[in-house]
Amino acid sequence: MPSAPASSLPSPCDVLVIGGGPAGSTAAALLAARGRHVVMLEKARHPRFHIGESLLPQNLRIFEKLGVAEAVRAIGVFKPGASFVSDEHGKKVSFSFADGLNKAYTHSYQVRRAEFDALLFRNAATRGAETHEDMLVTEVALGGAQGSRVTARDAAGHEHVWQARFVIDASGRDTLLAKQQGGKQRDAHTNTAAIYGHFRGVAPCEDCPEGNITIHLLDDGWCWMIPLPEGVTSVGVVGTPEFFKRRKGSFEDFLRESLAASPSTRARMQGAELASPVTTTGNYSYRAQRMRGEGWLMVGDAFAFLDPVFSSGVMLAMASAELGAEAVEAWLDDPARAEPLLRAFERKVHRAIGSMAWLIYRINRPVLRDMFMQPSNRFRMRDGLVSLLAGDVHANTNRQLPVLVFKTTYGMLSLAHRMGFRLRGGKLRRAPPPLPAMAAE
Ligand SMILES: Cc1cc2nc3c(=O)[nH]c(=O)nc-3n(C[C@H](O)[C@H](O)[C@H](O)COP(=O)(O)OP(=O)(O)OC[C@H]3O[C@@H](n4cnc5c(N)ncnc54)[C@H](O)[C@@H]3O)c2cc1C
């Protein structure tokens, strides 16, 4: 659709937020509640489909701060923990968030993102943000301390222009500013893609606590099964490019074939019927070169995306938006005095991503899989791992210690693995015979 010319002078605002997903809506709500003039532009119209349905306990603190804890509870499926299923190891292991070292938040929820994102977006408006849907940001002319000019196009093709003192890029995987700056880098450690859909009639994971996300560790990657409201289960397979090259038929056929290839997923999918289109997301891990500059910063997926095996994306997005909003608030009052807060924002976001990335980069390696499937709680290693799985990425030193022991143990077991040993029954054993395939559930 051709763009109509800008009809009037740019509209001034304190903060312009690009994108109304969890990160954008969090930043917009927090800044608007502090009396700032915030404009949030969303290219779609809520409710709209989005993947990323399993949340972490550390999300709950932010829900409380946003005043949406009860509303999220009302649309969510209670999630007490995560279960891992491995055909190779012939077992299932469940981790309960209640065992984590941080006892403040010991559960989470699984949500339809259409409802969840709409709820957060409306909440930002309720708190005073000026929100626009069907409004695609097409150009950002960053102007540093002089403010930035943001151009957007509405559904009728009309152009709108804002002059913002500060710009927050929360455009998710569209990575608007990173693309504009040519600073988007593919993650060298992971090169996976995902294929997924919603199903009805997926059999529950036997012996797993009700409401847990199940992660099935497959030969070529992993699979998620997330219980959603009204008997729907979100099912997805994540694999390498080689895995995706095997596709011959339709995406639906490929998803079904992939799930049939592993005994534990095959058993659960036998009576399952597809309840949505099958979707793919390719080549998806990346990081932008810069997270902030004079008068702008990036939050959530607009800065970085990690493989979602531990359901960390929404928590990382909302937590970075919370930190970013705090720094922007200070910047609006005095850019010079905001510098320490902006540096802390950057450092904490890098640290949070780094904590999750350590686990994510290793989940397809035999040693980490052995440690997940035979968890030891010596030196509270398992409880430390549970804390990480709960998204407790800003833990104090006491809570970090067990995680450090876990990582050191991983290092030692990796060495043993290179010498031909594997962890079996809690002991190192040389060249173990292949394990029997897991009995069908
Ligand atoms: C296959 C897969 C599975 C996942 N599973 C999980 C999971 O189980 N749990 C979890 O926590 N996370 C998961 N994630 C990650 C999660 O989806 C993201 O991390 C999260 O949505 C990031 O939030 P955000 O607000 O940064 O971005 P988004 O949620 O993507 O929101 C960005 C918004 O910006 C809008 N936008 C984009 N460009 C423009 C523009 N130019 N103008 C205006 N608006 C624009 C978009 O329409 C969108 O609404 C998964 C991701 C994938 C790919």
Image (spheres, rainbow, N blue to C red):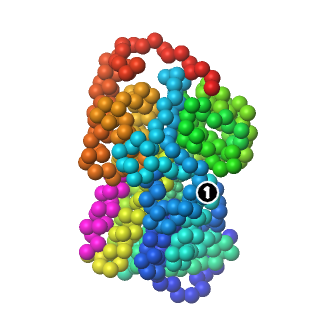
* Residue 331 vertical position relative to residue 402 in the rendered view, above or below: below
Q: Which residues are magenta?
A: 337-352
Q: Quadrant of residue 188?
A: top left
* Residue 323 vertical position relative to residue 280 in the rendered view, above or below: below
Q: Please state which of residues 106 and 50 is positioned toward the viewer in this rendering.
A: 106
> Is 29 included in the stretch rendered in magenta?
no
Q: Position of residue 115 (x, y in %)?
A: 62, 60
Q: Secondary structure at mark 1?
A: helix
Residue at the location (48% across, 49% down)? 107
On screen, residue 127 versus residue 274, left or right, reads left
* Residue 416 vertical position relative to residue 164 in the rendered view, above or below: above
Q: Please state which of residues 370 and 218 is positioned toward the viewer in this rendering.
A: 370
Disc tally is 1
On screen, residue 212 versus residue 271, left or right, reads left
Q: Position of residue 377 (x, y in %)?
A: 35, 32
Q: Residues within 10 Å of mark 1 (few under 14, many from 20)?
A: some
- Amino acid type shown at disc 1: Ile
Residue at the location (66% across, 28% down)? 267
Q: Is residue 66 visible?
A: yes
Q: Is residue 217 visible?
A: no
* Residue 361 vertical position relative to residue 8 in the rendered view, above or below: above
Q: Residue furthest bottom?
A: 8
For mark 1, what is the residue? 75
